[in-house]
Amino acid sequence: MKFLSLFFTLLISLSASAQIDFKEVGGQLQYSVRGGAYKPVGATVAATTVTSGTATGPVAFTNLIGVPAYLSAFALNAKLETALYALNRTSDRQELSAHLADLGNPHGTTKTQIGLGNVPNVDATNPANIVQGPLFRFMTDVERTKLAGLPSTSVPLSASAVRQYFSSTGDIDYDQQNGQFYLKNAQLNVLIRNYLNSLDGAAPGKILAYSGGGQPPVWIAPPTATTVTGGASGTTSPGGTVVSSDHIFADSTVNRPNFALMVDVPLSTTAQIQSFLTSAQTNKRGIIAPGSYSLVGGSQFTQTGNWDNVALTAPSGATFVATGTTCLVVTDNHTAKRFGFYGITFTSTNTGNGYPLVFSNELPTIQGWEIARCTFLGNNVGNWNAFNITAYSTASNAGATSSDFYLHDNLFRNIPRCGMEILSQGYDAVRLTNLVITANRFENLAVNSGEGNRMATSLSGLITGIYHARNTSTNAKNMAYEFVNVKYAKAESNTAVAYLEPCVGYSISDDGRNSTEQIYLEGGYFNVTSRPFQLYDCKDVHIKGGLYIAGRGIDMNTRLSSIESITATCTNLFNAEAIVQFGGTSNNNVLKSSVLSSWGSAAAGHEPSFETVVLRANTYNNQVTGNTLKQGKRPGLSPATYFTPGDVVNQGTGSPANTASANTVQLEP
């Protein structure tokens, strides 16, 4: 079609310059030269000779049949080129316009050629195609609305205000008594934790300090003194000598793992985990893939390699299942320094006796062991612990002194016996020192009739330097927290609730070695079926603050000890007894500034306390002063009847004599 258009354009051009006329006759194209007769196109024309610029001989133009021979090749070529040029210009314009209108990729240009080779070819408006990180995260409309609802202020919000706000919105479970908060949104957790740390003044080298009474913790620079070296144990003054409030019993900054120096090692099989545990490691972090891991035939994972700055962690969750009772043991003569287990679940279905789920024996030397955010699961049946540290001091089993244990933010559920039992046996030397046990939860959801001592924590033997705080025990049996023969310990803001079986809150005792001393119990909340405290054959034990509701009274057989500023209610679930009793040869103790009550016992169908405070025979030089003594009434009697008038009953016969002063008695109406 393009050729025909060109041909007719050429004919029109030739007609104008050579006086050639065309017409159609009967559907056939005919032409006439200079007014001559019309002839059909395609008829033969004789050659013509032309002079003076016209054709002088035959024109060799054989490809166009019927064109007169007198036209020169030069003239024809010129006319043809002119026509072609005009036609091509029109075609070029059309092609250029079409090219400009083409919004595709007509040249096949690649993203690499224009410097975008690293840009992924994904829909950037889809959140699933964008990698989120600490510096960039998407926020839902709900989260945005909640953050927008924060009260505006020209100064930074306090950490406690932020906790209170998110607690009211339901995003945080805030334990007011323990000063802890639990966030339900993992990403929000990171943001709020960092924000609270910044407001609280968190910084390298600082430690968390707790004032008790449910107040939030604050970051402080540690005092220079880090060890108690004597003091109250030699005094003869009533009440002993209480250390300053900023005294540090355990230093939480020593021999902690440093994750910044670690190289990650992926672990996805039982064999890989066992190899990691038994091999020497330095600056390594074993990251366990999600799954369940166990060794067959009653075997357990064993940590036997020399370790320095090593972590075994399950960031996405992993479970070690004991085919016997033990999942993991730290054993053999080696040194394990600055290591920890994180985020792992340990469990067993054993219903008999056995070793703990995780423990260390006397053979290794440990300098810095952290267990955090782990879960220990039992089934309420049998006789075995969740976690043990055992050190012997006998000649046959002498190990080096181990130190710096950090056990925090773990969950112990339905463990048949103890959640934690830490033992230093032999008593010829201190083998365990510097223990920090904080923010652990111990929960038993059913009774275990086959085990008599079902404690949250038990520490016994020559252990020094203990900080035990903000732990929660639910339905322990016999006692929630036990200290035997330990020295230099502080326990504060702990919680104990028990309603399934008889349970004491704190039990502090000495087995005749005269080593249980300088123990400080501050704050906390107990609601238990037996005594809130029982102190036997110990000295320099100091109880200050807290709210305690108990089925039995406080039993004191101690010396150089004190109870100050507590609120205690005795409901007398079993027998009518004193709210506070000093027995045995208790001496040089002080009870002051406290509220002691048995009000409400009658309404609950129980007898009230027989005495508010009683000092038994053979006690001496004890002081009871400045207390409010609330004597409950007996049930079903009118008018109101009481066992005793409610004031201090002093039966002591020793010298110097016990004294009672400035106490206020209130009888239940």
Image (cartoon, helix red, strand yellow):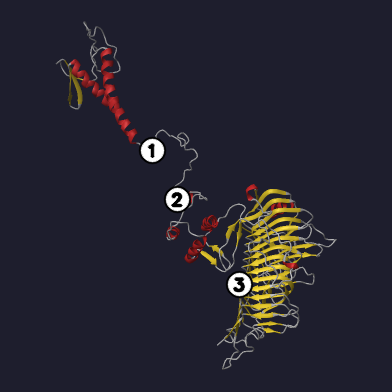
Looking at the image, is 130 positioned above or below residue 621?
above
Q: Closer to us: mark 1 or mark 2?
A: 2
Q: Secondary structure at mark 1?
A: loop
Q: In whole angstroms, how far apart are the C-alphas of marks 1 and 2?
A: 24 Å
The answer to whether residue 623 is seen in the rendering is yes
Pick whichever, 510 or 342, lies toward us: 510
The kind of residue tagged 2 is Asn
Sort mark 2 into few (<14), some (14-19) or many (20+) by Cα contacts within 10 Å.
few
568 to 470, vertically: above or below: below
Amino acid found under the numbered disc labelled 3: Gly
x, y percentage for residue 52? 21, 5
Q: Which mark is residue 214?
A: none
| Among the two numbered marks 3 and 1 on one chain, the one whose residue lies closer to the N terminus | 1
> What kind of element bears circle 3?
loop
Say which label, 2 or 3, has the lower sequence index: 2
Determine crowd level at label 3: few under 14, some 14-19, many 20+ residues with C-alpha closer than 10 A: many
Q: Mark 3 — residue?
A: 546
Q: In the rendered image, which residue does mark 2 sit on? A: 126
Quarter that holds the N terminus = top left
For the residues carrying marks 2 and 3, which lies nearer the camera in this image? Answer: 3
Q: Residue at x 49, y 38 (%)?
A: 117
Q: Which residue is mark 1?
A: 104
- Considering only order in the chain, which callout, 2 or 1, is on the residue closer to the N terminus? 1
Distance from disc 2 to disc 3, alpha carbons, whole Å, reads 53 Å
Return the x and y of residue 411 as percentages of the image width and height: 63, 65
The quarter of the rendered structure image containing the C terminus is bottom right
Gap between marks 3 and 1 measured at Cα: 76 Å
Circle 2 SS class: loop
